[in-house]
Image (cartoon, helix red, strand yellow):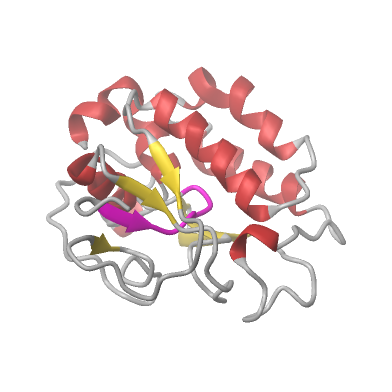
């Protein structure tokens, strides 16, 4: 087991803080896949900047994917066309951004193809983001659930929509900032579409 580094959850289009910490703790990154799926977290939710302020995009999961299902076994629900809704929201929010068109052809695949499992979906999205922001991070994965990792930073619960991020985030240009001001710690998608190749330097 790695004695230094950090353990991270697997999120959907994770917030900027997630990548700041990935960059800080590489190469000792461990991704948690054996935990029980907690509700109302970034594991199936991302916050983006809409004309009306912060908009939460939630990936619906199958009924029964509650507290006693391992996160790697949680299945995505396709009872309604959430992929179309998410893609339309991303287009509406970021079509005017400097770099949306630069990434959209690769990203749209994630809103056309159906992925059975949430963890696999998030993992492939994460690999796309890491490649796009040129952040070289090698990921390893947990084999069992361990409540605490002595000597390692643990972000499984601390990066949470209900907990304000306390890392020092410098403002960058956001499409709708003239309406609501700079919004901290949005999804990495917000940084990527607004900063493009400069995202790596920002992190």
Q: What is the span of residues highlighted in magenta in the rendered image?
A: 6-13
Q: Quadrant of residue 150?
A: bottom left
Query: In the image, residue 12 lies at what x, y percent?
Result: 53, 52
Residue occupying the far front of the picture: 1
Query: In the image, residue 87 lies at what x, y percent?
Result: 66, 42
Residue 70 left/right relative to 49: right
Q: How many marks?
A: 0
| Residue drawn at point x = 28 percent, y = 67 percent | 149
Query: In the image, residue 151 lies at what x, y percent?
Result: 17, 63
Viewer can see residue 69: yes
Q: Which quarter of the rendering shows the C terminus?
A: top left
| Residue drawn at point x = 72 percent, y = 52 percent | 117
Q: Is residue 68 above or below residue 50?
A: below
Q: Is residue 178 magenta?
A: no
Residue 62 left/right relative to 57: right
Towards the viewer: 178 or 106: 106
Towards the viewer: 162 or 101: 162
Residue 108 left/right relative to 84: left
Q: Quadrant of residue 70?
A: bottom right
Residue occupying the far right of the picture: 79
Q: Is residue 86 above or below residue 149?
A: above
| Residue drawn at point x = 19 percent, y = 52 percent | 4
Q: Quadrant of residue 197?
A: top left
| Residue drawn at point x = 67 percent, y = 79 percent | 66
Viewer can see residue 175: no
Q: Is residue 12 magenta?
A: yes
Towards the viewer: 141 or 156: 141
Query: In the image, residue 64 lies at what x, y percent?
Result: 77, 77
Q: Main secondary structure of the magenta part?
A: loop
């Amino acid at each position: 087991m790695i004695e230094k580094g950090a353990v991270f959850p697997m999120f959907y289009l994770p917030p900027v803080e997630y990548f700041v910490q990935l960059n800080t703790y590489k190469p000792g990154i461990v991704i948690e896949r054996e935990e029980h799926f907690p509700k109302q977290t970034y594991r199936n939710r991302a916050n983006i900047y809409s004309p009306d302020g912060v908009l939460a995009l939630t990936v619906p999961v199958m009924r029964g994917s509650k507290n006693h299902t391992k996160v790697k076994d949680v299945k995505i629900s396709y009872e309604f066309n959430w992929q179309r809704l998410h893609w339309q929201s991303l287009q509406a929010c970021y079509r005017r951004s400097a770099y949306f068109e630069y990434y959209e052809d690769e990203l749209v695949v994630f809103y056309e193809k159906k992925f059975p499992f949430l963890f696999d979906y998030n993992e492939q999205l994460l690999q796309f983001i890491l490649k796009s922001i040129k952040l070289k991070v090698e990921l390893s994965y947990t084999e069992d659930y361990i409540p605490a990792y002595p000597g390692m930073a643990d972000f499984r619960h601390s990066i949470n929509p209900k907990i304000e991020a306390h890392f020092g985030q410098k403002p960058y240009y956001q499409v709708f900032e003239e309406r609501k001001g700079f919004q901290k710690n949005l999804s990495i998608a917000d940084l990527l579409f607004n900063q493009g190749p400069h995202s790596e330097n920002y992190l």
